[in-house]
Image (spheres, rainbow, N blue to C red):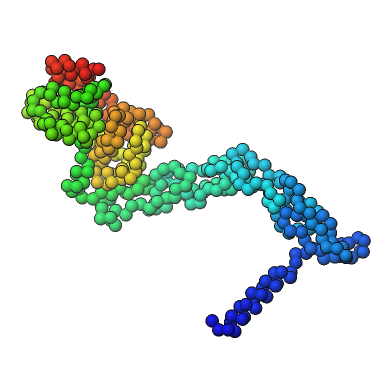
């Protein structure tokens, strides 16, 4: 940088500094004693004019008393009183000081409407937030435009763009609207089929649950294995089950393997036939419900215990057939909640769906499934004890 430019900048800086310093903040005051109008210096923030200037003296300033303030240079004869009092559902943001009045704000989720802290408006499904609410103003909602959706009630979420199925090399199964996203699905392959598989179906669980005693003895699994008729599950497989699964899940997996290994056993044939009939009936009830992605999320959120989140639901919906989705999600919930009964969990969840404006036909269909599975419990219990036959020690363990 040349010397001339450097000198110019330095001089300019000095000039600005000098200008700021030499221009005082003043006011005009009429002096009655002399009949002259005087130019007096103002008092700085946190003070007030105790005595105006005269021809022989400068302005005399005094500090603001307690609970009073002055927030700027002034020519006032007194400070302002801190007159703000926080209302109900407000909290103090800035306390009263000698330079500021007290400042209050409504608590999170509310804004000041006249004299009250009102709740921020919650945008319904099909509407998104275009301006989030603050302590001073309400939320502003707007209907989702074409190509966008909002599936939930929210005072913070904006409308989201529909998923572009073609950009993901997926096929659009159904077109979204203002309240739901496009539903995409790719070609089913071996990997997706594996991900949609269920280790224990609802009907198998309804039957296998009778194999789980109230109190598990240390050798329960070995006792059950030895008591089941037909080909036995080998010791190595049994040990693998014990190391991998929870006690209740161990019983489920043992019975499933026993069922698979003894397909030609007359009693097992009856069991398989009954389970197949059960699964066809359940599929009939659920197959026509057309449960959406948003409805699946709501259902899973209302099941007790550990939740199956949206991030887990989305790939299942994308890869699995509509009739497989709810079964896979319920199976995933059962795996997360080893000690809970899926049917009872589903019953619990159904009680809360009315508050979400869930379609009545969907709720009724799911209730029919629950009712049907409960009606089979006694039959399954009878079959289970027939399988055990004269194994009285096992029956006692089961009933204990």
Give the residue at x 64% y 74%: 13
Q: Residue furthest front?
A: 218
How far across and down, in percent of the image, does residue 49 sit? Answer: 80, 56
> Toward the viewer: 173 or 112?
112
How far across and down, in percent of the image, does residue 372 sit? Answer: 25, 25
How far across and down, in percent of the image, does residue 33 sit? Answer: 92, 61
Whether residue 310 sits left or right of residue 230 in the image: it is right
> Toward the viewer: 88 or 203?
88
The quarter of the image holding the C terminus is: top left
Question: For residue 283, which quarter of the picture?
Answer: top left
Whether residue 184 sits left or right of residue 87 in the image: it is left
Whether residue 367 sits left or right of residue 204 in the image: it is right
How far across and down, in percent of the image, does residue 219 sit? Answer: 19, 24
Does any portion of residue 45 appear in the rendered image?
A: yes
Question: For residue 166, which quarter of the picture?
Answer: bottom left
Q: Is residue 131 above or below residue 262?
A: below
Q: Is residue 38 above or below residue 154?
A: below
Give the residue at x 54% y 81%: 1
């Amino acid at each position: 940088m040349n010397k001339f430019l450097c000198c110019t900048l330095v001089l300019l800086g000095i000039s600005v500094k000098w200008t700021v310093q030499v221009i005082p903040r003043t006011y005009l005051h009429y002096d009655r004693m002399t009949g002259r109008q005087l130019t007096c210096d103002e008092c700085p923030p946190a003070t007030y004019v105790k005595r105006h200037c005269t021809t022989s003296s400068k302005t005399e300033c005094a500090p603001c008393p307690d609970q009073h303030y002055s927030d700027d240079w002034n020519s006032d004869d007194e400070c302002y009183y801190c007159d703000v009092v926080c209302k109900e559902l407000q909290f103090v943001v800035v306390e009263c000081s000698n330079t500021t009045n007290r400042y209050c704000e409504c608590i999170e989720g509310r804004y000041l409407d006249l004299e009250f802290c009102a709740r921020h408006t919650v945008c319904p499904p099909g509407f998104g937030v275009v301006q989030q609410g603050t302590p001073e103003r309400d939320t502003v909602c707007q209907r989702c435009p074409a190509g966008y959706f909002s599936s939930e009630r929210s005072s913070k979420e904006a409308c989201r763009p529909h998923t572009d199925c073609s950009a993901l090399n997926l096929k659009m199964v159904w077109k979204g609207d203002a309240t739901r996203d496009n539903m995409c699905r790719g070609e089913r392959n071996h990997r997706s089929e594996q991900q949609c598989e269920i280790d224990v179906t609802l009907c198998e669980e309804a039957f296998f649950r009778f194999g789980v005693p109230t109190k598990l003895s240390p050798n329960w699994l070995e006792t059950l294995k030895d008591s089941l008729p037909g080909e036995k599950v080998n010791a190595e497989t049994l040990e693998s089950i014990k190391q991998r699964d929870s006690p209740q899940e161990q019983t489920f997996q043992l019975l499933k393997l026993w069922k698979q290994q003894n397909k030609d056993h007359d009693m097992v044939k009856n069991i398989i036939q009954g389970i197949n009939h059960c699964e066809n009936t359940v599929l009939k009830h659920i197959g026509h419900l057309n449960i959406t992605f948003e409805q699946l999320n709501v259902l899973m959120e209302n099941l007790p215990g550990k939740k199956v989140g949206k991030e887990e639901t989305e790939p299942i919906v994308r890869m699995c057939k509509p009739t497989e989705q709810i079964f896979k999600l319920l199976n995933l919930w059962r795996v997360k909640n080893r000690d809970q009964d899926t049917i009872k969990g589903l019953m619990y969840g159904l009680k809360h769906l009315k508050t979400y404006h869930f379609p009545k036909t969907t709720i009724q269909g799911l209730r029919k499934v629950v009712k049907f599975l409960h009606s089979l419990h006694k039959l399954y219990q009878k079959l289970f004890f027939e399988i055990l036959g004269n194994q009285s020690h096992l029956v006692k363990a089961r009933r204990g």
